[in-house]
Amino acid sequence: MKTMKAVLLYENSNELILREVNIPELNDGEALIKVKSCGICHSDLNIIDGIIKPPKYPHILGHEIAGIIEDYKHINREEKCLLKIYFKKPKEGF
């Protein structure tokens, strides 16, 4: 199975740990994004501080990303989506 790097938060800890984790198999309507940049927002800080409890531990933080679509499974273009996709032609020689 392929792996990816992820910043994990474990229960009863506010320390963030970078680990290699397995890339989950895609379900219908999901896309695999190769993250190029990721932000930690105020909600993430509330999770780290224990103010908000995540759905499960260990918890992967960072949901504000910019990246490249690597794979997808049965995406219906007519459905509303939380993913905004921008297509940009690469610069020549880049």
Image (spheres, rainbow, N blue to C red):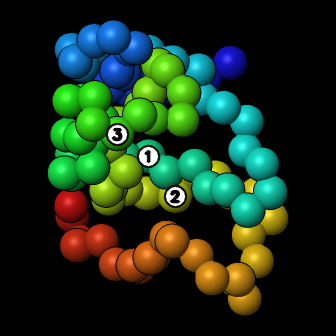
Q: Secondary structure at mark 3?
A: loop
Q: Which residue is mark 1?
A: 34
Q: Earlier in the sequence, mark 2 or mark 1?
A: 1
Q: Earlier in the sequence, mark 2 or mark 3?
A: 3
Indicate left or right for 74 with 14 as reference: right
Instruction: Please tell me whether mark 1 or mark 3 is closer to you in this view.
Output: 3
For residue 90, the mark is: none
Distance, label 2 to label 3, CA atoms, is: 30 Å
* Near-viewer residue (12 or 31): 12
Q: Are marks 2 and 1 in contact (CB under 8 Å)?
A: yes
Q: Can you give x and y, in whole percent of width and height, for residue 43 in the image?
A: 27, 49
Q: Secondary structure at mark 2?
A: strand
* Residue located 59% across and 20% down the image: 22
Distance, label 2 to label 1, CA atoms, is: 6 Å
In the image, residue 80 above or below residue 74: below
For residue 52, the mark is: 3
Q: Which residue is mark 2?
A: 69
Residue 16 lies in quadrant: top left
Dot 2 alpha-carbon crowd within 10 angstroms: few under 14, some 14 to 19, many 20 or more: few
* Near-viewer residue (35 or 42): 42
Q: Earlier in the sequence, mark 1 or mark 3?
A: 1
Q: Is residue 38 visible?
A: no
Instruction: Please tell me whether mark 2 or mark 3 is closer to you in this view.
Output: 3
Dot 1 alpha-carbon crowd within 10 angstroms: few under 14, some 14 to 19, many 20 or more: some
Residue 28 lies in quadrant: bottom right
* Residue located 21% across and 14% down the image: 15
In the image, residue 83 above or below residue 54: below
Q: Amino acid at mark 1?
A: Lys
Indicate left or right for 35 with 22 as reference: left
* Residue located 22% across and 73% down the image: 91
Q: Amino acid at mark 2?
A: Ile
Distance, label 1 to label 3, CA atoms, is: 27 Å
